[in-house]
Amino acid sequence: MYPQTSLIIINNERISRATRELLAFLRERGVVCYLAKAIESAEENSNDSIDIIFVEFAAFIAKKSELIRLAKNGEIPLLIISEKFEEKEKMEAFAAGATDYITLPFSDRELESKLAYYGRINYNKKAGRDIIEINPNDLYRITFEKAAIGIAHVGLKGKWLRVNQRLATMFGYTPAEIVNKTWWDLTYPEDLYLDSDLMTRLLAGEIDSYSLTKRYLRKDGSVFWGLLNVSLHSDTDGNPLYFIFTLQDETSRHLAELAKTKNQNNYTVVSWKV
């Protein structure tokens, strides 16, 4: 069972070979596809019959707010497509409200399973079983369970509401243990207020999301560096409900950069002496 209609949004006039293959794949399976080269034309093609939206990463980053509205704030699955998908980009997409992602060139098996999954959601929704409202966890199951990064919903007062296994493991806790902590409990004390201004601006609606690298505390007391992306989920009236956090362990990369900087400084000193 597949979605009946889809909307594919690209970022420029050139359609890549991989995107053409995606388009052909969908059409071979009976999915009616609309192709838009800009958010404006996407809005013209968008209607109540759209079941799923595919959007190139560059287009998503450029027009995040408009695309989230186009996807009816999560009611329509929004899948990001990219030929080069770094972990940092996945984190940025999830933090900004993307439902899932597909790396091009795609795997037939992966795309088949995702189409079947989102098609089942649409079938239930159209049959009057509004699982998005009743059971939102089902909509984000793939994102939470399959992501190679830590993902969490965090209350406005810092309480963990929901975490995936990857994030819990990063801190050395089980998901059941970590929800008894707050975000502040696991942040390195000296870095606690590094993003306080950014969070204030996020709550005020001045920015859609933010990211930064800072230190965190594991259960055993050890410290690690993490790249954090934060966005805000609000109700239909614009009232903030909770934060969406994605986190990636950047310790190895950070230490490598420090070592590189140290070596460069040493080299500079030696060269100066010569």
Image: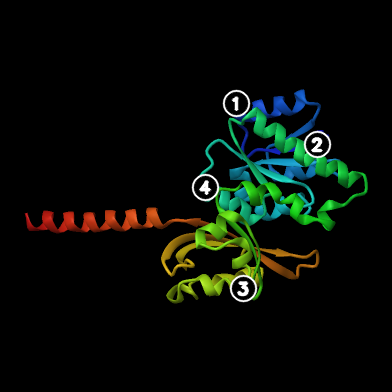
Q: Earlier in the sequence, mark 2 or mark 3?
A: 2
Amino acid type shown at disc 2: Pro
Q: Label 3, secondary structure: give it.
A: loop
Q: Earlier in the sequence, mark 1 or mark 3?
A: 1
Number of the label disc, if any, that sits on residue 17: 1
What separation in Å lies between label 1 and label 4 (alpha carbons)?
23 Å
Q: Earlier in the sequence, mark 3 or mark 4?
A: 4
- State whether residue 208 appears in this view: no
Q: Is residue 220 above or below residue 105?
A: below
Can you identify the residue that label 2 sits on?
Answer: 3
165 or 206, which lies in front?
A: 165
Callout 1 crowding tier (Cα within 10 Å): few <14, some 14–19, many ≥20 = few
Q: Earlier in the sequence, mark 4 or mark 2?
A: 2
Number of the label disc, if any, that sits on residue 87: 4
Amino acid type shown at disc 4: Glu
**222 relative position to 228: left or right:** left
Q: Residue at coordinates 65% horizontally, 38% vertically from top-left?
A: 10
Number of the label disc, if any, that sits on residue 158: 3
